[in-house]
Image: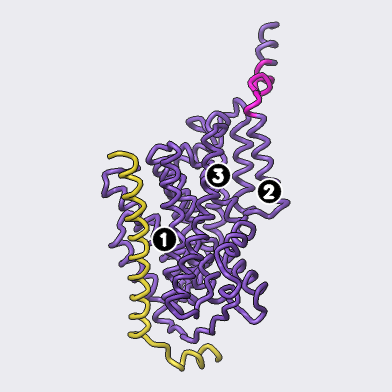
Chain colours: A yellow, B purple
Amino acid sequence: MDTWTFGWTVALIGMGGTMLVLWSLSLLILLIKKIFPYQSQETEMQKS
Amino acid sequence: MESAIVSGLQGILLGVINLDVQHIVMIAVGCTLVWLGISKGYEPLLLLPIGFGAILVNIPQAGMMDEHGFLRFFYDNGVLTEIFPLLIFIGIGAMTDFQPLLENPKIILLGAAGQFGIFLTLLLALALGFDKLDAVAVAIIGACDGPTAIYVSSKFAPHLLGAVSVAAYSYMSLVPLIQPPIMRILTTDKERKIVMGVVKQPVSKTTKIIFPVVVTIVASILAPLGAALIGTVMLGNLLRESGVVDRLRSASENEIANIVTLLLGLAIGGTMQADKFLRGETLLVLALGLIAICLDTAVGVLFGKLMSLLTGGKINPLIGAAGISAFPMSARVVQVEGQKYNKKSYLLMHAMSANAGGQIGSVIAAAVMLSVLKGMGITG
């Protein structure tokens, strides 16, 4: 494989892949927050 | 008797006889790193042992990096095996609070944009004639994350480890000088004055505990070659958030991290032998490292501008600069810059979200890169 094919492949898949993985994680965080919402009791527990 | 005395004297003078200009230059470089750590406060935890290791390894005939040498032992067993950076990652995970990111998850995308400098620098390094694997090692300085840079460069280009590590840690400490001019050039006065509202989305304890487990599973499945990197950071964070293993959390962020940092620094210093370090290539590595961090900042800010546009001006693009892994230094830089243009603008919490995203982003970027290279049949 020549240098430029290597470089552009790693760069494009790398940038796209990183963005895709982090975007997936942001969606997962939203999902987890929906499934396990913050309970107001937690504030009281933290205060006590 | 006479010859015995001469031989004995020669033994004593062995160091002096073999001392050349290159050794003296490298001892001076080591002393400079120690001075930077002590006097200027530039990442002293790493630069001090690295500098001292560089001094030790350049003492002629001391054999520090010979087969059974003092520094060679730590290098072979800690760096080449990748154990040291991974142990430090557990400590980083234990020290990091991902709450700001969990409160505002869309900001994590800035942490992805903040890694683009890695890949753009890869192209630049290839254009400058670096070998493919060397270019990967140089580009990873753009992760702005010392352990990640060490992990990747020790895998693909161990001969560049000294230069890559020194560049990574030096530039991380220079973030307050490197970032502001780029932030100013790429944003308008109006954009810099944007006031971002307070995000009031409290996060449950369960979410905080599940987060590291889910990230480990999902990210490792998507980029399996980075499972060790991602897994160790998230293990550290799970120790922190679980609240039931306080001794392990404390050991990870204190005793283990401290001991490993010392040994890692010495081992990296050990790679800075005169004949390997004093090359034109080293200067290029240092220059490309600086460019990588500038590109990270630039792409982060530009992505911030895009997010600002898409949200109707609700996001201050300055926080894009915090999408790198230098935590929390970069977030503080954003806060200071924002305050210069609008005293009512408090960007710190938003910048902390982006900065936490940058910490995850740098590890994910390295993991993705390792997986892509493996897929292309290129392994370290």
Q: Which mark is residue B36?
A: 2
When asked about the image quadrant of residue B226, the answer is bottom left
Label at residue B232: 1
- Residue located at (53% from left, 50% from top): B291
Relative image position of residue A42 (x, y in whole percent): 47, 89
Tell me which segment is drawn in magenta: B10-23
> How dense is the environment of label 2, judged by Cα within 10 Å: few (below 14), some, or many (20 and up)?
some
Q: Quadrant of residue B25?
A: top right
Q: Amino acid at mark 1?
A: Thr
Residue B69 position in % (x across, y down): 53, 33
> Element under label 1?
helix
Chain designation of label 1: B
Looking at the image, is mark 2 or mark 1 nearer the viewer?
2
In this rendering, do the residues under marks 1 and 3 share a single chain? yes
Mark nearer the N terminus (2 vs 1): 2
Chain under label 3?
Answer: B
The amino acid sitting under disc 2 is Leu
Q: Is residue B136 magenta?
A: no
**Where is residue B78 shown, x and y percent of the image?**
46, 46
Is residue B105 positioned above or below B362 on the image?
below
Image quadrant containing the C terminus of chain B: top left
Identify the residue position indicated by label 3 in the image. B287
Q: Residue at x 57, y 32 (%)?
A: B278
Give me the C-alpha separation between circle 1 and circle 3.
30 Å
Q: CA distance from mark 3 to mark 2?
A: 19 Å
Our reading of the magenta stretch's main secondary structure is: helix
